[in-house]
């Protein structure tokens, strides 16, 4: 049993997180939490910034979890970019350590959900397969489907990878995502593919919110199944 702590307060609910050696991360705080909450690590695309994706992920997870959004390094035009899978993995480690230090007792980072968009999704397979027990579930949005070799899928499954969602905004990605899902399933990972489109125009876009976020949230009961920290996974 965890000790009951004073309910977390934060206004606004999305705040900057200072991180030693790195630019500030962005964090969505589970307002009202009185004990440890699970962690979602949300990684943005190239020449992007963490604020937008963090806001999107807060819409999906509300106050059920922490959402930690690594910033990366300045790209020179007001946006940011990650320097590769190893660099991003180190930044995630630093961000999570800073979160635990700032909010002692409120963070359960024992098994985290990895969410990546575009570049964050492309780098995601190498990161989560490096330590599958740390990231037993993941959402890869608009990227990363071409990184799943049979060997990498087997490594992820053997190490504890359980669920992986491939969320597509462009129809051209669906075939590759389905191929990746089949590779993952053969290795023992339960993998799903979803496709979102704008309801007003029927267009498909390279983005993460709107219909993509709705499709992702609809998959949460499956994606988080078996992890008692999330209850029934309904949001």
Image: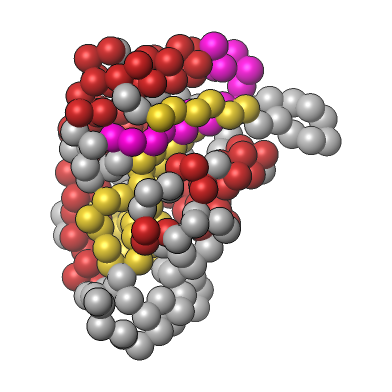
Tell me the residue at 60%/44% (across/down): 218
x and y, in percent, of residue 63 in the image: 49, 67
Q: In the drawing, does residue 45 fall left or right of residue 154? A: right
| In this rendering, position of residue 58 left or right of residue 66 | right
Picture quadrant where residue 207 is located: top right
Residue at left offset 21%, top offset 42%: 133
Quadrant for residue 108, please give it: bottom left
Q: How many labels does the image show?
A: 0
Above or below 154: residue 116 = below
Taking depth in this image into account, of 190 and 111 the one nearest to the observer is 190
Where residue 32 appears, x then y in whole percent?
45, 79
Is residue 217 shown above or below 123? below
Q: What stretch is highlighted in magenta?
A: 161-175
User: Is 154 covered by the magenta stretch?
Assistant: no
**Which of these two is toward me, 20 or 179?**
179
- Report the front residue among 79 and 25: 25
Q: Which image quadrant: the N terminus? A: bottom left
Q: Which residue is drawn at 44% across and 37% down?
A: 139
Q: Where is residue 179 in the image (x, y as percent from the top left)?
A: 45, 12
């Amino acid at each position: 049993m965890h000790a009951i702590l004073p309910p977390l307060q934060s206004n606004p609910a999305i705040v900057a997180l200072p991180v030693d050696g790195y630019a500030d991360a962005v964090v969505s705080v589970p307002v009202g939490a009185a004990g440890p909450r699970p962690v979602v690590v949300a990684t943005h695309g190239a020449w992007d910034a963490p604020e937008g994706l963090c806001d999107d992920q807060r819409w999906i997870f509300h106050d059920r979890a922490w959402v930690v959004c690594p910033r990366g390094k300045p790209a020179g035009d007001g946006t940011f970019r990650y320097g590769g899978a190893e660099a991003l993995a180190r930044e995630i480690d630093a961000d999570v350590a800073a979160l635990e230090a700032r909010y002692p007792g409120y963070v359960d980072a024992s098994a985290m959900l990895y969410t990546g968009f575009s570049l964050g999704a492309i780098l995601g397979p190498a990161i989560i397969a490096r330590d599958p027990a740390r990231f037993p579930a993941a959402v890869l949005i608009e990227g990363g489907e071409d990184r799943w070799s049979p060997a990498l899928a087997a490594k992820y499954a053997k190490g504890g990878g359980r669920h992986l969602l491939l969320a597509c905004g462009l129809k051209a990605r669906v075939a590759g995502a389905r191929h990746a899902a089949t590779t993952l399933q053969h290795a023992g990972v339960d993998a799903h593919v979803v496709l979102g489109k704008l309801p007003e125009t029927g267009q498909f876009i390279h983005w993460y919110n709107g219909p993509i976020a709705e499709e992702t949230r609809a998959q949460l009961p499956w994606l988080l199944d078996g992890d008692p920290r999330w209850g029934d996974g309904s949001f």
